[in-house]
């Protein structure tokens, strides 16, 4: 349907037939279309052979002066030995050309036309002026120099062949984006990257770039896709005395319009509305393409410099996509080129529209909204019979109901944010987080890590259980460490508390103090906590603080371990003074062999390019009840895999191949069920019955996470900023409300839609969290914990609210509005 602005514009078509510049035109007709009426005026134009010669002189000087100024042309110019010229000489020829054109159009025989036009036209009218002729030399004249265009600032010129027909359009495109086929041809000696960047910057478009394509590639795109705009940038030329245009699509191939006209005709019947040739000497291209009845084109009438072509395209796209009418957008972009004419003379002369007179110029709104196919002038007349009152009423109704929907979804969003802030969703969010982790597939074992476990069998077989926190004697631990050192591990982590020193036993050949003093051994201690552990656990006296790591664990309100502390400041009176966790100490020492050194900051820990950012204190992700997020805490991105493990007895009895240990992180800990050191993880709920795991394996998970993130680029988990969470929830709430509003028919259909949206939402959140490598593929660089539960609540609540509002106010969906106001039988689109 033609919009009001198009209906208010006026169209003037000048037909120059039966003559030429040397003989004159005995019959010139001007057709004026406005207010759905046609006025036809006749006149004539005398011969003016000097105008043809003057244009030829101007063209030679134009090419020569541009060649002398060194401007990059999108076609090679031919100056025909004119070398001794000045800018003043060229300016004089330009003025002569302008004077001759105006003198010719002020001829008495033509004044009947101009006088009658001026009685009808107003200075504020939007006027489309089309010059209709088959004479090439007339198409090349700079008609915009006619002072008519000075008097009517909203008028713009277009060219047309004498013979044309309405394009037969069969619209089948299913996308609401403007589809652009951009051909970036032979760019030797010129820069067309700017053209590409301007097209890429457009919103609500789907642009396909063909960079130096072959003829077959271009042909297939035109045949197999639906396009709204065809764009070309590169070299082009006119051959056969200016009658045939060709474009250079790559370094070796050029095409004339006739060589791919079948594909072009198909594209036009499928809705191609606009072709832009941002290249040189495009008049012949336009004449050839007009024979295929394309609605409109923009070409450059002469050779064009890179900067001029780029600036025109930028200014035209800004104006056209800013909802200016097509002709006014071209005029504005063309006139703005005048500022470049110190360096590029006559730049503002170059762009020109070529128009099929049977069609109404498309607007950006129509391209984006698919408001109908190409319309003929007769269809414009038919459109005037539509009731404007009914149209305005329908639009107002739709807008009013749309605002009601948007307001309802906004209220739902704010309510959801408030409930989340109060912690209503926290437990459900934590449980959903666990479920999404459980859906991930199995991963490979981490080959860099090996666990030596002290099992119940190890303890019972030697009756090792003693007082305090010991679970293995000093002598056996010393034997174990001595044996492991022979296997050349990179680093050994002792996850067993030993907060006192046994008296030396000279009868033992291996002393524990000696083994603990070795540089690749890291021991554990536990910090003092006024609330839960006022004492803490001291490290062995033989080990300096540089080889100590704390093992303080943090549980969520439901008892599950989802976070690890990498660094934290200890209380001044704490017996454990190290600020580094055992997992960080072991990972850092392993990575030092890879020449990767850590960088510690109060907000992050960095190894090479991998940064472990802390969870922000207060409300972060699903945590809304101000859980303790002190120190540098990160999520544990659990590896859905077991770990290489051997028992203490197997190591001491030499039942293990030494290659199991070489160059690895070896972690020693107790897994005996008589030792109360088990914890819940997201995977505990998947065990039947519910099963906690020993702390040594949680430490292994934490070490593996750091090593895998740094060395394997395995993603780490994070959360969005609080305000992004709000936008996410609002977006899903709005989408649900709008879709439910537009869906017709039963409540069951609307309920199914809401259910489908929740399923899609769950999939999006799961994929965002599944930031793990699958073979050689990494889905995301960082996993993100997206707010599923609040978003799902907002989706369902918005849908229900919109349903309630629809039923209480009895307003129809947008599609139902159109059914209540069906078009009359004589109305066309």
Image (cartoon, rainbow, N blue to C red):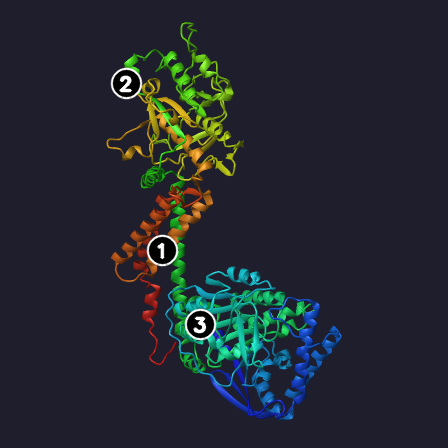
Q: Earlier in the sequence, mark 2 or mark 1?
A: 2
Q: Secondary structure at mark 1?
A: helix
Nearest the camera: 811 or 716?
A: 716
Q: CA distance from mark 2 to mark 1?
A: 62 Å
Residue 737, label in figure: 1
Question: For mark 3, what is the residue?
Answer: 272
- Residue 354, given in percent of the width and then of the height, sits at 53, 77
Determine which quarter of the picture holds residue 17: bottom right
Nearest the camera: 377 or 75?
A: 75
**Residue at the image position 64 percent from the left and 79 percent from the top:** 145
Question: For mark 2, what is the residue?
Answer: 457
Determine which quarter of the picture holds residue 654: top left
Give neighbour class at mark 3: few <14, some 14-19, many 20+ (Cα, 10 Å): many
- Residue 210, given in percent of the width and then of the height, sits at 48, 63
Q: CA distance from mark 2 to mark 3?
A: 79 Å
Q: Is residue 342 visible?
A: no
Give above or below for 300 relative to 610: below
């Amino acid at each position: 349907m033609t919009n009001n602005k198009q209906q208010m514009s006026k169209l003037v078509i000048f037909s120059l037939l039966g003559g030429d510049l040397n003989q004159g035109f005995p019959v010139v007709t001007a057709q004026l279309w406005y207010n759905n009426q046609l006025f036809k005026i006749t006149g004539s134009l005398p011969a003016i052979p000097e105008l043809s010669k003057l244009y030829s002189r101007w063209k030679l000087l134009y090419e020569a002066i541009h060649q002398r100024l060194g401007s990059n042309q999108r076609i090679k110019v031919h100056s025909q030995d004119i070398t001794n010229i000045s800018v003043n000489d060229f300016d004089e020829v330009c003025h002569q050309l302008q004077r001759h054109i105006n003198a010719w159009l002020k001829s008495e025989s033509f004044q009947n036309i101009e006088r009658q036009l001026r009685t009808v036209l107003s200075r504020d009218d939007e006027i489309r002026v089309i010059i209709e002729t088959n004479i090439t030399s007339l198409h090349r004249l700079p008609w915009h120099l006619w002072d008519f265009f000075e008097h009517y600032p909203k008028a713009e010129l277009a060219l047309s062949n004498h013979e044309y027909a309405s394009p037969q359009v069969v619209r089948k495109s299913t996308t609401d984006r403007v589809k652009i086929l951009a051909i970036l041809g032979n760019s030797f000696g010129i820069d067309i990257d700017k053209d590409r960047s301007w097209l890429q910057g457009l919103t609500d478009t789907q642009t396909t770039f063909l960079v130096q394509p072959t003829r077959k590639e271009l042909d297939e795109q035109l045949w197999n896709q639906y396009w709204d705009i065809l764009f070309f940038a590169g070299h082009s030329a006119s051959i056969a005395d200016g009658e045939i245009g060709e474009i250079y699509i790559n370094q070796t191939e050029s095409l004339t319009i006739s060589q791919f006209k079948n594909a072009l005709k198909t594209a036009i019947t499928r809705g191609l509305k606009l072709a832009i040739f941002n290249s040189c000497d495009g008049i012949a291209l336009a004449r050839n393409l007009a024979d295929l009845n394309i609605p409109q084109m923009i070409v450059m009438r002469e050779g064009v410099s890179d900067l001029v072509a780029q600036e025109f395209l930028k200014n035209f796209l800004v104006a056209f996509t800013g909802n200016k009418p097509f002709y006014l957008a071209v005029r504005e972009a063309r006139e703005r080129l005048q500022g470049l004419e110190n360096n590029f003379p006559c730049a503002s002369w170059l762009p020109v529209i070529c128009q099929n007179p049977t069609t109404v110029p498309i607007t950006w709104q129509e391209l984006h909204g698919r408001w109908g196919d190409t319309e003929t002038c007769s269809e414009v007349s038919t459109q005037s019979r539509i009731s404007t009152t009914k149209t305005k009423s329908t639009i107002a109704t739709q807008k009013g109901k749309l605002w009601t929907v948007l307001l309802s979804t906004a209220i739902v969003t704010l309510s959801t944010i408030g409930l989340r802030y109060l912690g209503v969703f926290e437990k459900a969010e934590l449980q959903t987080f666990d479920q999404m982790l459980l859906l991930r597939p199995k991963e490979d074992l981490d080959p860099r890590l090996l666990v030596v476990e002290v099992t119940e069998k190890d303890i019972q077989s030697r009756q090792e259980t003693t007082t305090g926190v010991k679970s293995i004697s000093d002598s056996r631990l010393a034997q174990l460490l001595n044996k492991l050192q022979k296997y050349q591990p990179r680093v050994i982590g002792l996850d067993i508390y030993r907060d006192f020193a046994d008296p030396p036993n000279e009868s033992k050949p291996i002393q524990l103090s000696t083994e603990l003093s070795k540089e690749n051994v890291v021991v554990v201690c536990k910090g003092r906590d006024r609330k839960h552990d006022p004492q803490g656990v001291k490290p062995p006296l033989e080990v300096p603080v540089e080889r100590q790591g704390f093992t303080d664990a943090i549980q969520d309100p439901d008892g599950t371990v989802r976070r690890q502390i990498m660094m934290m400041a200890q209380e001044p009176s704490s017996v454990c003074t190290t600020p580094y966790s055992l997992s960080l100490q072991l990972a850092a020492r392993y990575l030092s062999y890879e020449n990767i050194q850590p960088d510690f900051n109060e907000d992050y820990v960095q190894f090479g390019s991998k940064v472990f950012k802390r969870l922000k204190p207060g409300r972060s992700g699903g945590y809304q009840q101000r859980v303790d997020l002190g120190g540098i805490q990160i999520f544990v991105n659990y590896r859905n895999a077991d770990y290489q493990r051997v028992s203490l007895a197997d190591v001491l009895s030499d039942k293990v191949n030494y290659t199991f240990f070489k160059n690895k992180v070896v972690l020693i800990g107790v897994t005996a069920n008589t030792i109360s050191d088990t914890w819940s993880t997201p995977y505990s709920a998947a065990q039947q019955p519910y099963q906690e795991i020993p702390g040594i394996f949680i430490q292994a998970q934490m070490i593996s996470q750091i090593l895998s993130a740094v060395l394997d680029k395995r993603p780490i988990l994070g959360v969005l900023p609080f305000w992004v969470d709000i936008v996410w929830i609002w977006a899903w709430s709005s989408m649900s409300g709008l879709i439910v509003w537009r869906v017709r028919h039963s409540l069951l259909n609307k309920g199914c839609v809401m259910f489908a949206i929740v399923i899609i939402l769950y999939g999006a959140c799961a994929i965002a969290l599944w930031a793990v490598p699958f073979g050689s593929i990494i889905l995301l660089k960082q996993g993100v914990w997206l707010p599923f539960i609040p978003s799902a609540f907002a989706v369902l609540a918005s849908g229900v609210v919109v349903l309630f509002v629809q039923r209480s106010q009895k307003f129809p969906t947008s599609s139902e509005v159109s059914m209540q106001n069906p078009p009359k039988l004589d109305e066309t689109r």
